[in-house]
Image (spheres, helix red, strand yellow):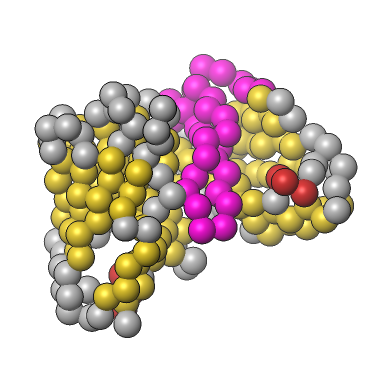
Amino acid sequence: KQEVTQIPAALSVPEGENLVLNCSFTDSAIYNLQWFRQDPGKGLTSLLLIQSSQREQTSGRLNASLDKSSGRSTLYIAASQPGDSATYLCAVPAGGYQKVTFGIGTKLQVIP
Amino acid sequence: KAGVTQTPRYLIKTRGQQVTLSCSPISGHRSVSWYQQTPGQGLQFLFEYFSETQRNKGNFPGRFSGRQFSNSRSEMNVSTLELGDSALYLCASSLVPDQPQHFGDGTRLSIL
């Protein structure tokens, strides 16, 4: 059974800092990993999708890396802004179907 | 292009009642998945539908059921509601299974 852990559970940083969010998973036989953002009371917004054959993906100030062998992914946010405040979740498909396992998330607060 | 639409946004029910939630996927998307999100358990997979067929089901009791119509719209039903069913129910659609999912803003269900 795939288990996904995200550390830290919460993070508070001053504006402008670079930060790293961590995601670990127990079953390395994955074919992709996805990072999402969730604002309070809202659904999830996809940020980055990394295929198993890739080591990293970048979108603007976001960079996600994937190390399947160690069961880890990191989401790097450069020059954080107050608008980045949200909960960030990583998700890993379990098996060959769209049964996805999510981490609990990291709640990020960027202080102006 | 309209996103995933979930109705209603908020719902209050009492124990023992039953409820039906609706999800309209992005136009052209044929795969729909449902998730339950609670503070304690995080996001948990309920079921996935593709071409009107349930492809996968999470570990939820039989009180939770769903279906998909020929236009890809999906409904989920929860019978004999319990206090623990209070949660945010999220629907996600993708073109076909195993493709990146796009989430709606969810239905907030509160059981009194």
In the image, taking residue A108 as reference, residue A33 lies left or right, namely left
Q: Residue, x 50% and y 52% (percent of image)?
A: A42
Q: Position of residue A105 (x, y in %)?
A: 57, 52
User: In this orientation, which residue lies closer to the viewer: B67 or A3?
Assistant: B67
Could you tell me if residue A108 is visible in this image? yes
In the image, taking residue B99 as reference, residue B50 lies left or right, namely left
Q: Position of residue B56 (x, y in %)?
A: 22, 41
Q: Residue, x 71% and y 45% (percent of image)?
A: A84
Q: Position of residue B112 (x, y in %)?
A: 32, 82
Could you tell me if residue A29 is visible in this image? no
Give the image quarter of residue A48.
top right
Q: Residue, x 37% and y 26% (percent of image)?
A: B99
Toward the front, the furthest residue is B1
Q: Position of residue B43 (x, y in %)?
A: 43, 54
The image quadrant where one finds the N terminus of chain B is top left
In the image, taking residue B7 as reference, residue A39 lies left or right, namely right
Give the image quarter of residue B17.
bottom left
Confirm whether the magenta stretch covers residue A99: no
In the image, taking residue A101 as reference, residue A95 lies left or right, namely left
B47 lies above or below B32: below
User: In this orientation, which residue lies closer to the viewer: B83 or B107?
Assistant: B107
Toward the top, the furthest residue is A53
A67 lies above or below A23: above
Q: The magenta stretch spans which residues? A: A30-58
User: In this orientation, which residue lies closer to the viewer: B41 or B65?
Assistant: B65
User: In this orientation, which residue lies closer to the viewer: B8 or A39?
Assistant: B8
Confirm whether the magenta stretch covers residue A48: yes
Q: Main SS type for the magenta part?
A: strand
